[in-house]
Image: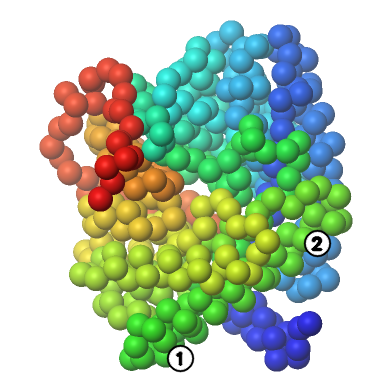
Amino acid sequence: MLNIFEVSETNKMIEKENLDVRTITLGISLLDCISADLGNCNQNVYEKITKAAEHLVAVGEEIEKEFGIPIVNKRISVTPMALVGASACRGAEDFVTLAHTMDRAAKAVGVNLIGGYSALVSKGMTQADEWLIHSIPQALAETERVCSSVNLGSTKTGINMDGVRLMGQIIKETAELTKEQDSAACMKLVVFCNAPDDNPFMAGAFHGVTESDMVINVGVSGPGVVKTALEKVRGESFEVLCETIKKTAFKVTRVGQLVAQEASRMLDIPFGIVDLSLAPTPAVGDSVADILCEIGLEYAGAPGTTAALALLNDQVKKGGVMASSYVGGLSGAFIPVSEDQGMIDAVTAGALTLEKLEAMTCVCSVGLDMIAIPGKTPASTISGIIADEMAIGMVNQKTTAVRVIPAIGKDVGEQVEFGGLFGYAPVMPVNGYSCEAFINRKGRIPAPIHSFKN
């Protein structure tokens, strides 16, 4: 039973500390939409999505009113479209029609974003996978709400370096097609190692083939709540620090569990997972970097940053896992640049570099996220950045990802503007030395040996 103190405390978190449920994401299997006829496939996809998600937005709004909890986004994730379109599509142009269908369906039901324009190619690519990947630049440039992801590696299969090389080129092409909008389509494209099947966060959400026909996943946020709690224990020991983070993460995750259960009941769709990640926004006081500073750093990026982030990530998971029946997705702390004012400030001050961010990804939830780089950066260098991040995920048996924006026509010192939750980002310098000969090798990097781990 909730007591009046807990109700008051939660209200304070919402009103003054930026607590919100970042997303309710409805996962929908489209395997039963597969058809050898492209027209039928598109029609099946549209009808399945619009029927399944017909009440999603209304239910989200009703929960917001009933409990006073902001739900920032209502989203949909679908089966990786490379699988759905494999029988019907005969080229990249055919896959683009499926992206348009996804976009139309998302607009029809009123969701903010739809994910699943995806391919899973950690070991190799089918012809359909290649066609979908080649279609990504056009698909993202011509749609408003479609998000795309490609899984390029895993701890069990290694890294598909042919896919890594190709995705460097695809990211550059995507940037070029939307250069008038600061290459904004790249915000909707992420590459993964060890991508989870049940991630509610975009741009990496897709409905895994191991999932049931439909499922409700919820992603909670709350960096501002954690920071406020830590302000009360300044100078205290690490034991007190860890206990404070754990207790706060528990409270934040309970809010997500409540929303997930209500949404599941009202929609009559099974509850999947709560992703208990600390996902920042550009709003003042809603920053993971500010938490790191509260722990004791002058700026994110200072010596000690990786240790502080490891501590934060672990305590968030330890506190949150007790608060939900099912925890999944990415869960932990996100460190995007453009979506986090504290990270932006650290980059601007020169405290945070791409190399330091890469080190931090060894212990955070995801990876190099929402980072603007010079538009002149070669595709091979982007592939090298991806390969490094995939290796971190593969060897450490964790999810890692890369979402970079080559800002066409812009260089270090300038900034790109995205607006809304995506914020703005300073263009960060990239190591100028070439890795082209390495990236142009064909094949894959084999999986690491597991029996001799030390």
Q: Quadrant of the N terminus?
A: bottom right
Report x, y in % for residue 343.
Answer: 36, 64
Tell me which residue sits at (36%, 26%) in the image. Answer: 160
Q: Quadrant of residue 124?
A: top left
Nearest the camera: 373 or 11?
11
Q: Quadrant of residue 30?
A: top right
Report x, y in % for residue 78.
Answer: 66, 35
Nearest the camera: 82 or 136?
82
Secondary structure category for the residue under label 2? helix
Q: Is residue 365 above or below residue 129?
A: below
Q: Is residue 55 above or below residue 61?
A: above
Q: Quadrant of residue 122?
A: top left
Question: Amino acid under label 2?
Answer: Glu
Nearest the camera: 160 or 222?
160
Q: Which mark is residue 232?
A: 1
Q: Mark 1, residues whose alpha carbon is within 10 Å: few (<14), some, or many (≥20)?
A: few
Question: Amino acid under label 1?
Answer: Lys
Q: Are marks 1 and 2 in contact (CB under 8 Å)?
A: no
Secondary structure category for the residue under label 1? loop
Tell me which residue sits at (69%, 50%) in the image. Answer: 272
CA separation, marks 1 and 2?
33 Å
Tell me which residue sits at (15%, 40%) in the image. Answer: 432
Q: Is residue 393 above or below residue 157?
A: below
Label 2 sits on residue: 262
Q: Is residue 42 above or below residue 281?
A: above
Report x, y in % for residue 153.
Answer: 40, 33
Q: Would residue 331 appear left or right of 251 to someone viewing this image?
A: left
Q: Mark 2, residues whose alpha carbon is within 10 Å: few (<14), some, or many (≥20)?
A: some
- Residue extending furthest toward the left: 433
* Res. 72 visible in picture: no
Tell me which residue sits at (53%, 35%) in the image. Answer: 148
Report x, y in % for residue 228.
Answer: 49, 83
